[in-house]
Image (spheres, grey):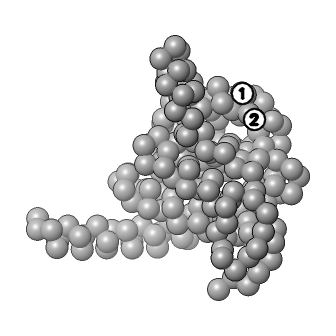
Protein backbone atom coordinates (compact mmCIF):
# COMPACT_ATOMS: atom_id res chain seq x y z
CA UNK A 1 0.00 0.00 0.00
CA UNK A 2 1.49 3.36 -1.04
CA UNK A 3 1.79 6.35 1.25
CA UNK A 4 -1.04 8.24 -0.48
CA UNK A 5 -3.32 5.21 -0.12
CA UNK A 6 -2.44 4.77 3.58
CA UNK A 7 -3.10 8.46 4.20
CA UNK A 8 -6.44 8.38 2.42
CA UNK A 9 -7.49 5.13 4.11
CA UNK A 10 -6.71 6.37 7.62
CA UNK A 11 -8.51 9.67 7.09
CA UNK A 12 -11.58 7.95 5.65
CA UNK A 13 -11.57 5.48 8.56
CA UNK A 14 -11.47 8.35 11.03
CA UNK A 15 -14.32 10.19 9.31
CA UNK A 16 -16.46 7.05 9.53
CA UNK A 17 -15.58 6.43 13.18
CA UNK A 18 -16.20 10.07 14.13
CA UNK A 19 -19.64 9.90 12.55
CA UNK A 20 -20.59 6.91 14.72
CA UNK A 21 -18.81 8.33 17.77
CA UNK A 22 -20.65 11.65 17.56
CA UNK A 23 -24.01 9.84 17.69
CA UNK A 24 -23.17 7.10 20.18
CA UNK A 25 -21.25 9.24 22.67
CA UNK A 26 -23.06 12.59 22.61
CA UNK A 27 -24.95 11.80 25.83
CA UNK A 28 -21.89 10.55 27.73
CA UNK A 29 -19.85 13.57 26.60
CA UNK A 30 -22.58 15.94 27.79
CA UNK A 31 -22.93 14.01 31.07
CA UNK A 32 -19.17 14.22 31.64
CA UNK A 33 -19.18 17.97 30.99
CA UNK A 34 -22.12 18.47 33.38
CA UNK A 35 -20.41 16.45 36.12
CA UNK A 36 -17.13 18.34 35.70
CA UNK A 37 -18.94 21.70 35.79
CA UNK A 38 -20.81 20.70 38.95
CA UNK A 39 -17.55 19.55 40.55
CA UNK A 40 -15.74 22.80 39.80
CA UNK A 41 -18.70 24.84 41.09
CA UNK A 42 -18.60 22.86 44.35
CA UNK A 43 -14.88 23.55 44.80
CA UNK A 44 -13.67 20.14 43.65
CA UNK A 45 -10.85 19.27 41.33
CA UNK A 46 -10.17 16.90 38.44
CA UNK A 47 -7.36 14.32 38.41
CA UNK A 48 -6.46 12.84 35.02
CA UNK A 49 -4.33 9.81 34.12
CA UNK A 50 -3.28 7.64 31.18
CA UNK A 51 -0.27 5.91 29.61
CA UNK A 52 1.79 6.79 26.54
CA UNK A 53 -0.24 8.93 24.16
CA UNK A 54 -2.99 8.99 26.78
CA UNK A 55 -0.46 10.39 29.28
CA UNK A 56 0.12 13.25 26.86
CA UNK A 57 -3.64 13.62 26.44
CA UNK A 58 -4.11 13.78 30.22
CA UNK A 59 -1.64 16.68 30.34
CA UNK A 60 -3.34 18.37 27.37
CA UNK A 61 -6.78 17.98 28.97
CA UNK A 62 -5.60 19.35 32.34
CA UNK A 63 -3.92 22.30 30.62
CA UNK A 64 -7.17 23.27 28.91
CA UNK A 65 -8.82 23.62 32.33
CA UNK A 66 -5.97 25.33 34.19
CA UNK A 67 -5.07 27.67 31.33
CA UNK A 68 -8.01 28.31 29.01
CA UNK A 69 -9.70 26.73 26.03
CA UNK A 70 -11.57 29.58 24.39
CA UNK A 71 -9.69 32.81 23.74
CA UNK A 72 -13.07 34.59 23.85
CA UNK A 73 -13.75 33.77 27.50
CA UNK A 74 -11.72 35.50 30.20
CA UNK A 75 -11.85 33.27 33.24
CA UNK A 76 -10.08 31.98 36.32
CA UNK A 77 -8.02 28.80 36.20
CA UNK A 78 -9.82 25.58 37.02
CA UNK A 79 -8.19 22.95 39.28
CA UNK A 80 -7.08 19.99 37.15
CA UNK A 81 -4.00 17.85 37.69
CA UNK A 82 -2.43 15.37 35.26
CA UNK A 83 -1.10 12.45 37.31
CA UNK A 84 1.49 11.75 34.60
CA UNK A 85 3.87 14.66 35.14
CA UNK A 86 5.71 13.97 38.41
CA UNK A 87 8.62 11.90 37.13
CA UNK A 88 10.32 11.75 40.54
CA UNK A 89 7.25 10.20 42.14
CA UNK A 90 6.47 7.91 39.18
CA UNK A 91 10.01 6.51 38.99
CA UNK A 92 10.36 6.21 42.78
CA UNK A 93 7.07 4.41 43.24
CA UNK A 94 7.58 2.16 40.20
CA UNK A 95 11.06 1.24 41.40
CA UNK A 96 10.11 0.61 45.02
CA UNK A 97 6.67 -0.90 44.49
CA UNK A 98 4.81 -1.55 41.22
CA UNK A 99 4.00 0.52 38.14
CA UNK A 100 0.36 -0.53 38.50
CA UNK A 101 0.07 1.72 41.56
CA UNK A 102 1.44 5.00 40.17
CA UNK A 103 -1.98 6.58 39.68
CA UNK A 104 -3.90 5.02 42.57
CA UNK A 105 -1.24 6.23 45.03
CA UNK A 106 -1.65 9.79 43.75
CA UNK A 107 -5.44 9.49 43.95
CA UNK A 108 -4.98 8.35 47.54
CA UNK A 109 -2.77 11.36 48.31
CA UNK A 110 -4.55 14.08 46.32
CA UNK A 111 -8.16 12.97 45.86
CA UNK A 112 -10.97 14.12 48.09
CA UNK A 113 -14.66 13.19 48.14
CA UNK A 114 -16.41 15.22 45.47
CA UNK A 115 -13.39 15.31 43.14
CA UNK A 116 -13.30 13.51 39.79
CA UNK A 117 -10.81 11.02 38.38
CA UNK A 118 -10.63 10.83 34.59
CA UNK A 119 -8.80 7.77 33.21
CA UNK A 120 -7.81 7.57 29.55
CA UNK A 121 -7.05 4.05 28.33
CA UNK A 122 -7.25 3.09 24.66
CA UNK A 123 -7.19 -0.62 25.52
CA UNK A 124 -9.74 -0.23 28.27
CA UNK A 125 -7.67 -2.55 30.46
CA UNK A 126 -4.61 -0.59 31.65
CA UNK A 127 -4.01 -1.95 35.14
CA UNK A 128 -2.78 1.33 36.59
CA UNK A 129 -5.90 3.14 35.30
CA UNK A 130 -8.18 0.44 36.70
CA UNK A 131 -6.41 0.58 40.08
CA UNK A 132 -6.84 4.37 40.08
CA UNK A 133 -10.58 4.01 39.43
CA UNK A 134 -10.92 1.49 42.28
CA UNK A 135 -9.09 3.84 44.65
CA UNK A 136 -11.18 6.81 43.49
CA UNK A 137 -14.41 4.95 44.19
CA UNK A 138 -13.10 3.91 47.60
CA UNK A 139 -12.35 7.56 48.43
CA UNK A 140 -15.64 9.00 47.17
CA UNK A 141 -14.50 10.47 43.86
CA UNK A 142 -16.62 10.31 40.72
CA UNK A 143 -14.99 8.55 37.76
CA UNK A 144 -14.98 9.12 34.01
CA UNK A 145 -13.32 6.76 31.52
CA UNK A 146 -12.20 7.60 28.00
CA UNK A 147 -11.77 4.23 26.31
CA UNK A 148 -12.87 1.97 23.47
CA UNK A 149 -16.04 -0.05 23.14
CA UNK A 150 -16.17 -3.00 25.56
CA UNK A 151 -13.11 -1.96 27.55
CA UNK A 152 -12.85 -3.50 31.02
CA UNK A 153 -12.88 -0.04 32.59
CA UNK A 154 -16.31 0.74 31.10
CA UNK A 155 -18.23 -1.14 33.77
CA UNK A 156 -16.09 0.37 36.55
CA UNK A 157 -16.49 4.08 35.73
CA UNK A 158 -19.50 6.26 36.49
CA UNK A 159 -19.40 7.68 32.96
CA UNK A 160 -17.69 5.99 30.03
CA UNK A 161 -16.89 7.60 26.69
CA UNK A 162 -16.28 4.66 24.35
CA UNK A 163 -14.80 4.97 20.87
CA UNK A 164 -16.21 2.37 18.42
CA UNK A 165 -12.78 1.16 17.28
CA UNK A 166 -9.85 -1.01 18.31
CA UNK A 167 -7.34 1.12 16.37
CA UNK A 168 -5.29 3.03 18.95
CA UNK A 169 -4.66 6.05 16.76
CA UNK A 170 -8.35 6.51 16.00
CA UNK A 171 -9.30 6.02 19.64
CA UNK A 172 -6.84 8.75 20.64
CA UNK A 173 -8.09 11.05 17.90
CA UNK A 174 -11.68 10.65 19.10
CA UNK A 175 -10.61 11.15 22.71
CA UNK A 176 -9.06 14.49 21.77
CA UNK A 177 -12.27 15.62 20.06
CA UNK A 178 -14.26 14.55 23.13
CA UNK A 179 -12.15 16.34 25.70
CA UNK A 180 -12.04 19.50 23.59
CA UNK A 181 -15.84 19.44 23.39
CA UNK A 182 -16.08 18.80 27.13
CA UNK A 183 -13.76 21.70 27.93
CA UNK A 184 -15.78 24.01 25.72
CA UNK A 185 -19.04 22.89 27.33
CA UNK A 186 -17.60 23.39 30.82
CA UNK A 187 -16.38 26.90 29.99
CA UNK A 188 -19.75 27.77 28.50
CA UNK A 189 -21.56 26.41 31.53
CA UNK A 190 -19.40 28.17 34.09
CA UNK A 191 -18.43 31.40 32.38
CA UNK A 192 -20.86 31.97 29.50
CA UNK A 193 -19.89 33.19 26.06
CA UNK A 194 -21.26 32.42 22.66
CA UNK A 195 -20.53 29.00 21.22
CA UNK A 196 -19.88 29.14 17.49
Which residue is labeled 2 in the image? Answer: 111
Residue at the image point whose x is 42% and y is 67% from the top:
17
Q: Nearer the viewer, residue 97 or 172?
A: 97
Q: Residues within 10 Å of mark 1 (few under 14, many from 20)?
A: some
Q: CB of mark 1 within 8 Å of CB of mark 2?
A: yes
* Rendering quarter of residue 3: bottom left
**Residue 41 in the image: above or below residue 5:** above
* Residue 66: x %, y % from top left: 69, 57
**Residue 71 in the image: above or below residue 86:** below
Q: Nearer the viewer, residue 118 or 158?
A: 118
Visible residue check, residue 189: no
Q: Nearer the viewer, residue 176 or 134?
A: 176
What is the C-alpha distance between the residues marked 1 and 2?
6 Å
Q: Secondary structure at mark 1?
A: helix
Residue at the image point whose x is 56% and y is 49% from the top:
58
**Residue farthest toward the front in the current orientation of the protein:** 88
Amino acid sequence: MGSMQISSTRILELIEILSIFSKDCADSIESAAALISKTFLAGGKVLICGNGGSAADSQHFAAEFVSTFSKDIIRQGLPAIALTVDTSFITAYSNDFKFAGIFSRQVEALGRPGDILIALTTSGSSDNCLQAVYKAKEKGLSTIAFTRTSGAITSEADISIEVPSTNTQHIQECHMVAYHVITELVEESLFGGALE
